[in-house]
Amino acid sequence: MAQEASSSTSSKTISLKTGDGEIFEIEASAAKQMKTVQRLIDDLGDDITIPLHNVFSKELPKIIEYYKKDITGEITKDFEAEFVKDLNDDEVKVLFLAANYLDANKLFEFLSQNIADRLESKSVEYVRKYFGVENDFTPEEESKLREERAWSFRGIKEDE
Amino acid sequence: MTDMESDRISCLPDDVIDQILSLLPIKDAGRTSVLSSEWRKKWLTLSNLVFDSQCVSSASSEDPSVSKIKFLKIIDNVLLLHSGPINKVKISAGYDLIDMNSVADIDRWILHLTKRSIKKLVLDFWLDEPYKIPWCLFSCQSLHCLKLYWCSLKPPMKFEGFRNLKSLYLEQVTMTQDTFEKLISGSPLLEKLILWDHNGFTQINIHAPNIKFVQIMGKFEDTSFDNTLRLAKPVVDQTSQSKSHGCSSNLVKFFDHLPNIEMLVIISYFIKYLFADIVPVKLPTPCINLTFFSICINFNDLKEISAVRCLLNSSPNLQAFTISARLEEHADHLTPVSYCWEDIFLEPIIPLKLQRVKILDISGTKSELDFIRFILLYSPVLEKMTVKPVLNVTSELMTKLIQFRRVSGKAEVIYLAKDSS
């Protein structure tokens, strides 16, 4: 492999290119936290712009922001709350999928808890749409199931 | 939103969905069974189950007996339908959901769980009397972690411990001395032990080759650590004085088995117990890994001050400590203790590497001030000393502190008035 001792400089930045053609810079130490990116760096070298086909310019800056805080060890509960405060459920899902693709473990775990928290007490219809699940029950089957699980429906407002 | 984006959004891969599902409370997970036929059984393979008041949302006007029945039925329902191994179960409920009538059901659930290779069990409910752990749990060898509150443990004769147990947390649990010994010595993989307010035994003998963390808070007569070479961070809080003072060299016994001790936290009377004999100038073997300790001492008891000196002389790598002043129950703390500085505050026999110290709850007595003076005098690399009085002692104290000679050029003395944290 034609690589020099490039791992010595921690201030080295890596260029990432999103699926819609925009380029962003991140620190090499942040790139280490995203296993997919690190693998690409290992294969292609760190001087080349790393292509990320499945991540787009809408979400990558937010991910970079998270890991910028992470390498300085400043991620607190307050920061995490602020981080997702203004995101709607779909925006969180997009971020979450990107974190999954990038194999960015810390962000992935944080977002999965956040999504679980958001889905608490949501209606069945809402969750179906969120996960992209098609309802293949007949109305009779569904109402029978709902009866069986009556205890889990108490206090939930269904959106009709 | 473009077509491409909306397609992406609906495509959450299965393993990712499972991850989210495992983080949902049981109630919401149960609802997912209605999503589609594929989802019908998904929630029943979740391996971490938490049964608490969140499962039951009841109207405030509801009869409490109705909520209890609901709670019971939910647990029955879920445990019966569940398939696959169960990793963790936590039952945490107040008296509104679990009462003495539920005991037979709880026994039944535990029996069921022992058959499902349960690894972690948490029982957090408070009945009229401690819940008697059923015998079936004592033969459950799949347990890695056990957390029990307000229970009593009376195992069968053949009980020999939990072979795979790594973490044990017991709060207000009753058992005999014999059971405690069997529990500890029969669980060779035990790494973490926390005992709060135990009942029924007074000797804490820790014979555990893999133990790394111990925290004991409660009343006991005697303690010993045997073969505990890995124990780095013991926390001991003895809430009442030992009746037996005559034990020879408690101290040497204690530190002998903790060669790797990195951090020591001793609260309340334990220091008195440890140093019941003549206090040596230093321990036979130095604690080379000890970097921090936090203890409670009675500054009027010169023996306890000598104990601190002994610890300082035996810990060449000590960087920080926190000492809280303890008031004795029997009020001899009002009579000032008379002594000679030269007798009590001898220069340390090794150089002190203290960087940060905290001295809390002092009232401004002579021995407390002398101790502070002693530390300032002999800590050449001290960076910060925090002093917090218990009453809002006058600023006279502060003035005195500032006047003490500090051998470290960059030592900063911070005095916390009562209202500041």
Image (cartoon, rainbow, N blue to C red):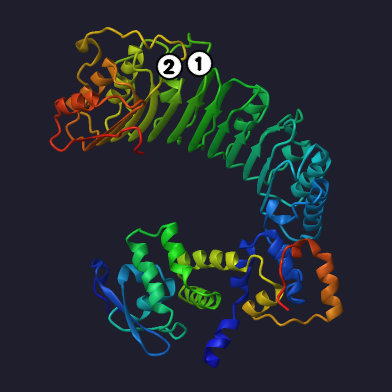
Give the mark nearer the N terminus: 2 vs 1: 1
* Image marks 2 and 1: residues in contact by CB distance under 8 Å: yes
Residue B370 at x, y = what percent?
23, 19
Q: How many marks?
A: 2
Q: Nearer the viewer, residue B397 or B263?
A: B397
Quarter placement of the N terminus of chain A = bottom left
User: Residue B39 lies in what quarter of the image?
Assistant: bottom right
| Spot occupied by residue B395 in the image (x, y as percentages of width and height) | 24, 27
Question: Which residue, given by chain and number where applicable, does mark 1 sit on?
Answer: B241
Corner quadrant of residue A116: bottom right
Give neighbour class at mark 1: few <14, some 14-19, many 20+ (Cα, 10 Å): some
Residue A32 visible? The answer is no
Q: Nearer the viewer, residue A127 or A34?
A: A127
Tell me if I can see residue B390 in this picture. Answer: yes
The quadrant of the rendering that contains the C terminus of chain A is bottom right
Q: Is residue A135 above or below residue B300?
A: below
Chain of the residue under label 2: B
**Mark 2 lies on residue:** B272
Residue sitting at 71 percent across and 61 percent down?
Answer: B27
The amino acid type found where label 2 is placed reads: Lys
Q: Classify mark 1: helix, strand or loop.
A: loop
Q: Position of residue B171 (x, y in %)?
A: 61, 34
C-alpha separation, residue under disc 2 versus residue under disc 1: 8 Å
Q: Does B374 sit above or below residue B331? A: below
Q: Numbered disc 1: what chain?
A: B
